[in-house]
């Protein structure tokens, strides 16, 4: 077994990019963390300048006493006494916090440890790195056609899968230590780590922690729990790799399963009847710090179960079930020689000079769309976008409704009639204010009763939302009158839809769409150049009539077409949804008609600008596709292409998404 584990480690370190890319990921994680800390401190300083009266902080003893008093009141209430879950949950909560009396948390404790443990970009980097190394560990031998030679040997089944799993566990341990050790070093270098022997309750946001431990103990326990959690999640991914036997399907299963778990974790409340699904969850155990900063019981068929117990059950179930199924499936699966021959079949047919180009194009289309699941990935992307944009995420309040009403009146080119209408509407509001003041004076003089005064107040006072909506429309019209001097093509345009499409409000959705596009292109095109090398078909292509250049030209065109198709599926849905909800009018008017472009110097129309933006999006999709294809031609292994592509595309997308305020 020791020799097998050593062999698996050697295979990982034979990957040339490993020693280059891993330090790069650690460095990127550290740079983003330091940038996040700097941003947060700058924002807090700006906020503190405007805070004059700040409430006195609650002492820890007052907090514990409040927990006892609240528990007693709830236990005395009939609504809580009638449920076994409520009674037992309150009793367990009191028992847990009763052991914490006497702890003295430090005040004004530095927040560095929170950044060490709670920075979610580190979780994303760790997640992506584990997937890349797992794909390398589990699927590279299969892709190179070596697995069918290894499995018939004495140690080729149960012992081999055991060695791979133990290698994965040790790899995860090293990655957890290195990633969060990097965070610790960054926080220490910025002088954000306080005394290690202070109570965990000293940390901001950890006052409700049910543990009587120090900050140092918390950090070591956090590393241990994070390692166990990532090992459990990796065990499930380990099983997916064995079941799918293919990089594309394995990554799709991993991403789909974890995304589903993450949505359940984020969308279900702690005290919902679905809370067991939220707590017995892979995403829950990945969010390790929440086990330390609060005490939560959830209702498991009437029995109060703590979140820590749920995490342990999730870990044990995931590891045991995944490992047993992995050993069984790996030991019983058939040879993959037949799968390898599928790649060779199109090139073993009799070649004809009259149909060479057609057969070459057909063969490459078959590989991209069928064998490499490109058609399936496009269909999946379409389903994801339809589901994502099926329900409108927009919200219209009264103020927005009034602003839309006024915009319908003022929409279009500027005119004296519209300016006069705004003046008339202002006079109407002023007249209402004067009449209301008269009624107040009549009430003071005793001419009308209080009941009559209340009637006049309700009739003569416009809603604040109406006033705000009119104010927005008036200010926009005045802005356009100023812009009319510079550009006669400006006109009044309803702004909200354009703000959602082109302004800051839609940045997160835009970045998420780019991330979906890059992921699909990575899955579909990462093997386009490596498949001939790993299956030895390259040896048949080189001496052929047209050679590698003809094949690469066909693949170049296919990559371009595929990227265009993926970009169309990704980027068409959000504009349609916004146009359906808000309407996107004024496409022929000047770009300066939109207030978000008030400082622009480009004398172009809104439609032309929108066309350029979407052409650039299509060009970026084509560029990404060609870059992935270029990487797949230069690299022999699919895992290298996927990891490099993740570094180039997915990690920056995730970083920008977090930076925009996830």
Image: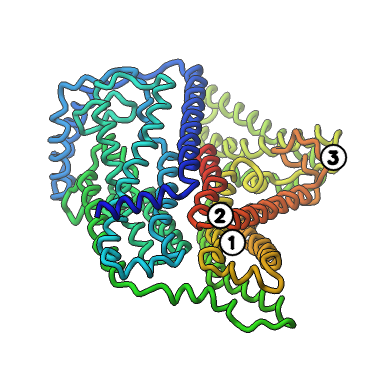
N-term-proximal mark, 1 vs 2:
1
Position in image of residue 121 (x %, y %): 45, 40
Q: Secondary structure at mark 3?
A: helix
Which residue occupies 47% across, 37% down? 23
Position in image of residue 2 (x %, y %): 25, 51
Mark 2 or 3, closer to the camera: 2
- Tell which of 555 and 612 is nearer to you: 555
Badge 1: residue crowd in 10 Å (few <14, some 14–19, many ≥20): many
- Tell which of 645 and 317 is nearer to you: 645
When asked about the image quadrant of residue 107, the answer is top left
Question: How many dots with numbers?
Answer: 3
Q: Secondary structure at mark 1?
A: loop
Which residue occupies 53% across, 55% down? 519
Q: Which mark is residue 529?
A: 1
Mark 1 or 3, closer to the camera: 1
Scheme by which the image is coloured: rainbow
Q: Secondary structure at mark 2?
A: loop
Position in image of residue 298 (x %, y %): 23, 48
Which residue occupies 55% across, 42% down? 652
N-term-proximal mark, 2 vs 3:
3
**What residue would you read off at disc 3?**
416
Q: Is residue 287 above or below residue 255?
A: above
Left or right, residue 82 beside residue 33: left
Left or right, residue 328 beside residue 430: left
When asked about the image quadrant of residue 211, the answer is top left
């Amino acid at each position: 077994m020791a020799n097998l584990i050593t062999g698996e480690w050697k295979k990982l370190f034979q990957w040339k990019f490993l020693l280059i890319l891993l330090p790069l990921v650690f460095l990127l994680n550290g740079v983003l963390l330091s940038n996040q800390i700097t941003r947060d401190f700058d924002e807090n300083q700006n906020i503190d300048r405007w805070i004059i009266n700040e409430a006195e902080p609650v002492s820890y003893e007052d907090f514990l006493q409040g927990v006892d008093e609240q528990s007693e009141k709830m236990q005395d209430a009939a609504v809580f006494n009638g449920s076994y879950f409520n009674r037992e949950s309150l009793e367990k909560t009191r028992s847990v916090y009763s052991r914490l009396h006497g702890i003295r948390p430090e005040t004004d404790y530095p927040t560095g440890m929170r950044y060490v443990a709670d920075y979610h970009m580190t979780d994303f980097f760790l997640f992506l790195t584990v997937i890349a190394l797992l794909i390398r560990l589990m699927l590279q031998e299969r892709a190179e056609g070596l697995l069918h030679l290894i499995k018939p040997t004495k140690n080729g089944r149960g012992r081999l899968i055991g060695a791979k799993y133990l290698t994965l566990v040790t790899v995860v341990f090293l990655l957890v230590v290195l990633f969060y050790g990097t965070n610790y070093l960054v926080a220490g270098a910025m002088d954000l780590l306080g005394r290690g022997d202070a109570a965990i309750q000293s940390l901001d946001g950890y006052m409700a922690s049910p543990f009587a431990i120090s900050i140092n103990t918390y950090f070591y326990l956090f590393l241990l729990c994070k390692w166990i959690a990532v090992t459990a999640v990796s065990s499930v991914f380990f099983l997916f790799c064995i079941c799918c036997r293919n990089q594309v399907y394995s990554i799709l299963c991993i991403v789909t399963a974890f995304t589903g778990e993450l949505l359940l974790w984020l969308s279900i409340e702690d005290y919902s009847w679905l809370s067991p699904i939220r707590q017995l969850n892979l995403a829950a155990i990945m969010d390790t710090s929440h086990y330390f900063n609060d005490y939560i019981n959830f209702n498991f068929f009437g029995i109060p179960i703590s979140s820590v117990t749920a995490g342990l059950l999730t870990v044990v179930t995931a590891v045991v079930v995944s490992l047993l199924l992995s050993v069984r499936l790996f030991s019983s699966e058939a040879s993959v020689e037949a799968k390898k021959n599928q790649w060779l079949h199109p090139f073993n047919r009799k070649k004809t000079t009259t149909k060479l180009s057609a057969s070459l194009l057909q063969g490459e289309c078959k590989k991209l769309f069928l064998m490499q699941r490109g058609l399936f990935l496009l269909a999946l992307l379409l389903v994801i976008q339809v589901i994502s944009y099926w329900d409108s995420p927009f919200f219209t309040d009264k103020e927005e409704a009034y602003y839309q009403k006024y915009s319908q009146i003022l929409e279009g080119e500027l005119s004296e009639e519209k300016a006069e209408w705004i003046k008339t509407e202002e006079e109407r509001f002023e007249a209402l204010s004067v009449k209301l003041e008269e009624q107040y004076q009549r009430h003071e003089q005793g001419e009308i009763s209080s009941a009559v005064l209340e009637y006049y107040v309700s009739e003569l006072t416009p809603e604040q939302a109406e006033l705000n909506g009119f104010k927005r429309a008036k200010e926009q019209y005045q802005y356009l009158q100023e812009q009319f001097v510079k550009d006669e093509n400006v006109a009044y345009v309803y702004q909200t839809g354009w703000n959602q499409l082109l302004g800051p409000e839609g940045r997160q959705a835009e970045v998420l769409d780019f991330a979906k596009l890059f992921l699909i292109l990575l899955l579909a095109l990462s093997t386009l150049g490596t498949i001939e090398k790993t299956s030895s078909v390259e040896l048949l292509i080189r001496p052929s009539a047209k050679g590698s250049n003809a094949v690469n030209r066909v693949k170049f065109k296919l990559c371009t077409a595929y990227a265009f198709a993926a970009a169309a599926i990704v980027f068409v849905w959000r504009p349609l949804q916004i146009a359906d909800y808000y309407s996107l009018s004024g496409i022929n008017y000047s770009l300066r008609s939109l207030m978000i472009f008030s400082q622009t110097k480009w004398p172009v129309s809104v439609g032309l600008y929108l066309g350029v933006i979407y052409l650039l999006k299509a060009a970026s999709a084509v560029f990404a596709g060609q870059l992935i294809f270029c990487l797949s031609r230069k690299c022999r292994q699919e895992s290298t292409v996927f990891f490099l592509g993740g570094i180039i595309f997915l990690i920056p997308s995730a970083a920008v998404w977090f930076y925009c305020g996830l």
